[in-house]
Amino acid sequence: MSVSSPSLPKPEGKRRAGPRWTHWHAIWVAAVLAFVLLWLFGKPFAGWAFKYPRGEQLPFRRLIGEFMKWLVDEASFGLFSFTELTRFIAAVIDFPYRIALSLLSTGFLQGQGSDAVQILPPVSWIAVIAMFTMLGFYAGGRRLALVVGLCFGFLALFGQWNNAMITLASILIAVPLGVVGGLVLGIAGYRWPMFAVFLKPVLDLMQTVPVFAYLVPILFLFGFGPTAAVVATIIYALPPMTRISMLALGQVPGEVHDLGRMVGCTSRQMTWRVLVPSAMHGLMVGVNQVIMLALNMVIIASMIGAGGLGFEVLAALRRLDIGKGLEAGLAIVALAIALDRLSQALARRAQKHEHKTAANAGFVARNPYTSASVALIVFTGIVGLAIPALQTYPEAWQVSTGTFWGEVVRWINVNFFDQLEAVKNALLLNVMIPFKRFLLGLPWLGVTGLLLLTGYSLGGLRLGLLVATLAYLIAATGQWEKAMITVYLCGISVILACILGFPIAILTAERARLWNWVQVIIDTLQTLPSFVYLMPAVMLFRVGDFTATIAVVAYAVAPAIRYTAHGLRHVDPQLIEAGTAAGCTPWQLLTKIKLKLALPEIILGINQTIMLALSMLVITALVGTRDLGQEVYIALTKADTGRGLVAGISVAFIAIIADRLISAGADRLRARLGLKH
Amino acid sequence: MPGEASSNVKLQCRAVWKLFGAGAAAALATAGGKLSGEALAEAGLIGAVRDANLEVRDGEIFVIMGLSGSGKSTLVRCMSRLVEPTSGEIFFNGENLLSAPPARMIEIRRHQMGMVFQHFALLPHLSVLGNVAFPLEVQGVGRQAREDRARKMVELVGLEGREEFFPSELSGGQQQRVGIARSLSVEPEIWFLDEPFSALDPLIRREMQDEFIRLQNVLKKTIVFITHDFDEAIRLADRIAIMKDGMIVQVGTPEELVTAPADDYVAEFTQNVIKAKVIRVASLMKPMPKRAPTGGYLSDIGMTSAIADVAPLFQSANSVLRVVDDAGQPVGCLKREDVVQIMMQA
Ligand SMILES: Nc1ncnc2c1ncn2[C@@H]1O[C@H](COP(=O)(O)OP(=O)(O)OP(=O)(O)O)[C@@H](O)[C@H]1O
Ligand SMILES: [Mg+2]
């Protein structure tokens, strides 16, 4: 293959300003020419370069499948078998989960199945709302109390209470386990650098493998049900917590470290009395992340039996019952906002210190919140026996908006069907389908070669080899075609997100008040679980690639806006003054100075957008795409671990290729602009 | 006391080296335990401390002074083995610290050493009292006992009434007072202070130095004090070690450094010092004359007073002061013309 010709000269390295026509240009021209020739004329005699021959495929799928089977059937650690281990983990998680579920939803039951008798009711809806409202008041004052109270009230009012409590029960179990697990891993990584070296790539991979792909092996090992869902949630929330823990611990000043050793701390005292408390602020940021990720995952994990709000959305999607789905979606939004604001306020709260009430005051005076909560739980529990409305939110008070949303959809369809269809079809026929055809027609060999060259010229041989190998592996495991569809959907979505995001960023970045509003909106968009985005898209455009694209754009637009605005806001004001002094018009100022200097930042924003788009794309398999996501989804329904993992890891590979190339490009650009990192 | 060669050495460093960089120990060993600056640069190593020899005597304030990056912090951390020296020996009360097992090191640090840090290193989640009691808490001292002790220390540094405050609620000077109280809570035998006042405003710094002198008059600890401020060194030190590029270029009393700087580097620091403030009566006095001067001695002065402090005592042109030792015995006399000469040099 001439594209990846082996005798490449050394990359130009530090030399930037060379002659206009360098050997580099020549190589690129030759490579692109070879690529085009292969693409246009290669098919008749080199079909294998277009479609990876079946017989040559690497049998990862089968091997993984066999490995999983072996794990479950035979693997043993001497004292106990692998199956016993998974059962043990399941039991450890199941027990507290049952308690949380009983407390929040089912009450404590005696007996099995339908004969079960409730011996203790769950905590009443009034007590739950009051407790969270008080927590809000404690953490963030009256405003937060109001927000949290309204959010939880919303859940009751719209009849989502029980589902929300099921979801909350999973979160209550997954978050502490995820936080502790991540912290322990983080501490280990901090203490033993060798372990960190091993941990980093694993975390990288775990954070790029799409969420569905996690679900497949977990489903296989733990079966269908809430326990599996909690396991998936913990695993999903673990990597960011680990990373943040390592970072936060690493930022503890050296002097504090010295202090710990100087006063003679043992290594346990050092960790728990010195390092962890000193890193608390950073760690709390991690806790907030874990909570939000757990919520996202618990919703998605409804596919393997988590139940709750996620199941409601999923069931509605399957029935295309827009009203029900939207209601559940809005409930998720309410829950997400409440949890996010609460955990953020609690993190800030942990920074401030309370001067203790005098120790001789009574228990109630010292613990007003706890006392009030206990009193409320007991009171509503007992009185609730006589007046059920105190215990369970009465159905008669519920407002169902399901029919209302159904009406809205009908109304939109009656009045705007033609317009919506026109937009959809125009985009599909003129842009999306041709782009898809184009990508599907490309030879994998040529693409791999071009990637090698791109990586080489941006970041050296290692990068080139990395991206080419990953691309090759995608082809060699038979995922090329589906991967191209993923690339096509992702590409279109990212372009649309940029077309939408850049103007917003440019128009608002320098208007402080307006920008604050935009920030609130994109912050909120980013806290919403990805599932939520599907409903409105389906409502307007039904299923298909276009719907998927809309959902992906909505999910992924935030970083495009945020990074662009950030870049624009941080251009050196002296340069802008210089430009103004030189008589630039505002337009020239924007295009010639600001955008140029903000470019590295903008590129990072695009990178983030791509990452988010890829993770969302997999979820849009639910609305009928035909890409790698669909492959994972099918694997999930068949509990076919090999198939799911191979497809999932292919998505991770695409993400890694994009990320490494773009980061290397941004670094180069930054160096050329003379900006520090 | 300065100048006195007291034999009770508290802490001793012998040929201590600390090199940063890969393969430092091997490089030093193959070179026979000594590496020149060029050899270090060639091997890609950083010579943070190079061949340091010094003795810290019981009850003295030993100041290590040098510019930023000269290796002061590294050296003082070698003394408590917070940093493991690449080679050399460190004796504390005659015990070789570098061969002490970890448990013994913890023991020594817990009970015999205290340290104050440049940026205070207070634990943000503990109150003033909690911070001061922390070293005792680590040792497992009961709550009542350690809080009683911590309260005393808080009082000692003048922070009574703020026991329940948190570090973020204190000013820099107050935070460092907490750091000082904390390091004293275990009644250490040796007290390390790594640029304790460098992060403070000049006015507060001055105030803290006075406070430090007051404390030392009460406590009489053995102190290793790090600073990059020569004026501070002169104010506080019994003896000063000057460091440059990891090496100790001169050790001596402030007076010795001012009157006989070992090289240009030291002279650079001392040239702006007001000599009369540093030079002691003892080094300027003349032997007692056979017979008392006409008009007698104006008054008696101590040997260790600074010249600047006694200068105002000279009133008329020919007056002479009598110098007495601690016991009040006359040991010499101080003449006006000698003092004038020193005063003119400033
Ligand atoms: N952990 C380390 N790794 C590598 N080099 C180090 C390390 N610690 C210190 N150094 C280097 O050793 C030299 C001495 O550092 P040290 O902190 O002891 O200087 P210092 O005199 O205390 O300076 P300052 O007044 O800035 O505190 C410096 O060149 C520093 O860069
Ligand atoms: Mg230092």
Image (tube, coloured by chain):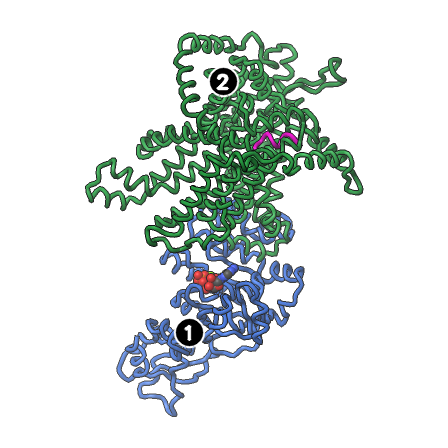
Chain colours: A green, B blue
- Residue A658 in view, yes or no: yes
Q: Residue at x 56, y 22 (%)?
A: A622
User: Percent from the top left, x then y, of residue B206?
Assistant: 38, 60
Magenta stretch mostly in which secondary structure? helix
Pointer 1 local density, CA inside 10 Å: few below 14, some 14–19, many at least 20: many
Q: Is residue A215 magenta?
A: yes
User: Percent from the top left, x then y, of residue A246?
Assistant: 55, 46
Q: Residue at x 61, y 56 (%)?
A: A264
Residue tagged by mark 1?
B254
Labelled disc at residue B160? none
Magenta-tinted stretch: A210-217
Q: Residue at x 43, y 21 (%)?
A: A429
Say left or right for A431 vs A271: left
Q: Is residue A474 magenta?
A: no
Label 2 marks which chain's residue?
A
Labelled disc at residue A538? 2
Q: Secondary structure at mark 1?
A: helix
Q: Amino acid at mark 1?
A: Pro
Most distant residue in the bottom direction = B290
Say whether mark 1 is within 8 Å of ligand 1.
Answer: no
- Residue A176 in view, yes or no: no
The residue lying toward the viewer, choosing from B290 and A677, is: A677
User: Percent from the top left, x then y, of residue A43?
Assistant: 52, 34
Q: Secondary structure at mark 2?
A: helix
Say left or right for A238 vs B333: right
Most distant residue in the front direction = A45
The residue lying toward the viewer, choosing from A522 and A212, is: A212
